[in-house]
Image (cartoon, coloured by chain):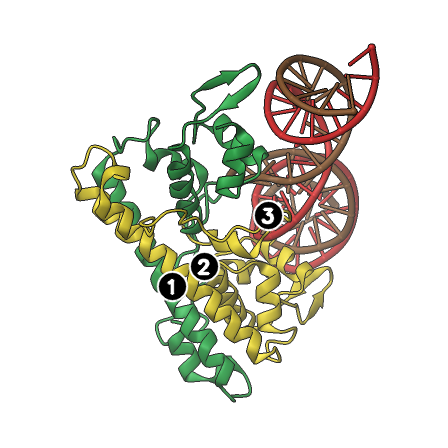
Chain colours: A green, B yellow, C red, D brown
DNA sequence: CCTTGACCTCAAGTTGACTTGAAGTTGTAC
DNA sequence: GTACAACTTCAAGTCAACTTGAGGTCAAGG
């Protein structure tokens, strides 16, 4: 398959595929003249990458998780840790979702005055708000504390 | 409170607080000389912003959801839509989590050959790619990256 | 032979969310 | 009365994940 075919099949633009190749996320099996040739299996790999992205992983993380040659030669502990991390994020997102759903039907003058909202959003009582961890440039986890 | 106090209480650096103010996410109640003064309630607001970020919303989205004065004068429909969007993301993340957990204990030579992994990861049938819209730099669909 | 269109490379631009740096101001401690 | 930390503004830098643009290659068609 040439890059156009992969692009069509995967829904990703050629520029992205080239970028992914440059990053080492996918590889072409050779060239025909200048043109890259890809194996059909690249589509599976792209699906996995897509899934990883949707789940919030960075390309670098996905690179590590997928392994350089598609094999999972990666530490099982690491995979497990990733799953746990993901799980914590899911908890937060569910809190947010429930908070939003309630906010959509609540008639309190301000959500901050609605105990149900605060509880759903996980802001109740303790003032233990979750750590906000995005990618690398953050030195340390920061949490907004004590607003309760 | 001056910006240093807010920074200390919230865990966010002053630069971020200034940036948030510039964006309209928070506001100061006045100045003492050049220095900003904040009401204590800004901490609640920051907690909410922090939660929104952790759930994967952009600052602009949070701005809309919180409203300019902390009130939820925003469309209930919008809140509900956001909740649904979040829910779809959560589904994907759960798929990923389960896939990872299985990968951590699976002994198949390649995960792509393990039907259980493929099913868990939601790649079972064929063409299980996420709904990618072409053409425009789409934000909504991948703003998921929140707290990885 | 010339055009067209899909491919190529490499460099630079974009967006979001900040951070960093330069240069200036203020309040307090010595 | 001066040193110093903590504040101020404004501009520019950073990072990820791409996209866009300039300039070039190559096969097919008229």
Residue at the (50%, 17%) spot, across then down: A31
Foreground: C4 or A28?
C4
- Read off the chain for label 3: B
- Quadrant assignment for the C terminus of chain A: bottom left
SS label for mark 2: helix
Crowd rating for badge 3 (residues with CA inside 10 Å; few <14, some 14–19, many 20+): few
- In space, the residues marked 2 and 1 are separated at their CA atoms by 7 Å
- Read off the chain for label 2: B
- In space, the residues marked 2 and 3 are separated at their CA atoms by 27 Å
| Residue under label 3 | B134
- Depicted C10 relative to depicted B143: above or below: above
Coordinates of residue B113 in the picture (x, y in percent): 24, 38
Same chain for mark 2 and mark 3? The answer is: yes
Pick whichever of labels 2 and 3 is earlier in the sequence.
2
| Residue under label 2 | B54
Coordinates of residue C20 in the picture (x, y in percent): 60, 38
Crowd rating for badge 2 (residues with CA inside 10 Å; few <14, some 14–19, many 20+): many
- Depicted A15 relative to depicted A51: above or below: above
Q: Is residue A129 visible to us here?
A: no
Q: Comparing marks 1 and 3, which lies closer to the viewer?
A: 3
CB under 8 Å between discs 2 and 1: yes
Same chain for mark 2 and mark 1? The answer is: no
Foreground: A36 or A71?
A36
Is A122 positioned to the left or the right of D28 in the image?
Answer: left
CB under 8 Å between discs 1 and 3: no
């Amino acid at each position: 398959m040439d890059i156009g075919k992969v692009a069509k099949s995967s829904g990703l633009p050629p520029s992205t595929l080239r970028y992914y190749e440059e990053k080492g996320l996918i590889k072409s099996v050779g060239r025909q003249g200048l043109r890259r040739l890809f194996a059909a299996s690249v589509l599976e790999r792209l699906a996995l990458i897509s899934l990883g992205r949707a789940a919030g992983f960075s390309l670098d993380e996905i690179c590590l998780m997928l392994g350089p040659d598609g094999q999972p030669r990666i530490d099982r502990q690491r995979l497990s840790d990733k799953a746990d991390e993901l799980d914590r994020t899911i908890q937060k997102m569910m809190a947010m979702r429930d908070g939003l759903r309630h906010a959509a039907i609540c008639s309190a003058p301000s959500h901050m005055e609605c105990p149900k909202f605060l509880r759903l959003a996980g802001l109740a009582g303790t003032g233990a708000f979750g750590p906000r961890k995005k990618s690398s440039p953050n030195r340390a986890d920061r949490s907004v504390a004590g607003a309760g």
